[in-house]
Image (cartoon, rainbow, N blue to C red):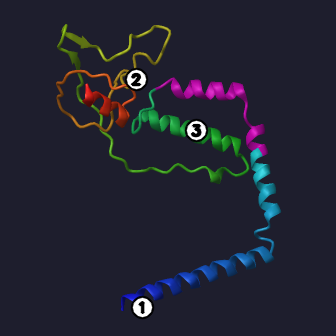
Amino acid sequence: RMYRRVWQRRTSCRNAHQMIVMVLAIMMSCGMLSPTSAVVEDETWEKMFVQGVDEKSLKDYLFKITSYDHVAGTLGDLRSTNFVKNRLESSLRDTPALVEVEAVPVMLSYPISRQLRMTEPVEFNASLSETILPNDATSDNVWRNLSFNAYSPSGNVSAQLVYANYGDPDDFVALEKL
């Protein structure tokens, strides 16, 4: 019985393979899969992309996107998504339907509080925030100054600080030998 099931699967795979080969052969004979047309189309898209790149525009776009918070799941993230979408749509005036934004459900966590404190040899509490600079409009943004590891669980950890080089397995083996 097991042999029959395996054989049936192999037969159905073989039939599917033959069907795919036949469909591809028909498409090629109709010119739908002409190798030269695919290459020309790729080259056309590549030329459009390269010709559309303007160094100043890229610099301006990067400045614009980084001028406000854009942490995943925040209004700033939505704002930068819409900015990129609008730029792409304006670049592809003839085919704006190609630009789509898809919302993807994710599990994100943001810290309620956070603290980094050294207890030995001298007690020290780290501020975990950058200094607010008058000439940087984003330096006082709560998200920019909210350093955290997004996928770490809440909790308190107290331990001796150890330098582990790159954190590779070999580095930890070397530490255990000390």
**119 or 37: nearer the viewer:** 119
What is the distance, in whole Å, between disc 1 and disc 2 at their CAs?
62 Å
Residue 169 percent location from the top left of the image: 35, 37
Q: Amino acid at mark 3?
A: Val
Is residue 115 depicted above or below 25 in this figure?
above
Q: Which residue is mark 3?
A: 84
Between circles 2 and 3, the one closer to the viewer is 2
Q: Which residue is mark 1?
A: 4
Q: Amino acid at mark 1?
A: Arg
Residue 77 percent location from the top left of the image: 45, 36
Residue 137 percent location from the top left of the image: 48, 16
Is residue 23 depicted above or below 178 in this figure?
below
The residue under the point 77% across, 44% down is: 48
Q: Residues within 10 Å of mark 2 (few under 14, many from 20)?
A: some
| Sequence order check, earlier mark of 1 and 3 | 1
**46 or 93: nearer the viewer:** 46
Between circles 1 and 2, the one closer to the viewer is 1
What is the distance, in whole Å, between disc 2 and disc 3 at their CAs?
20 Å
The residue under the point 70% across, 24% down is: 56
**163 or 144: nearer the viewer:** 163
How many numbered callouts? 3
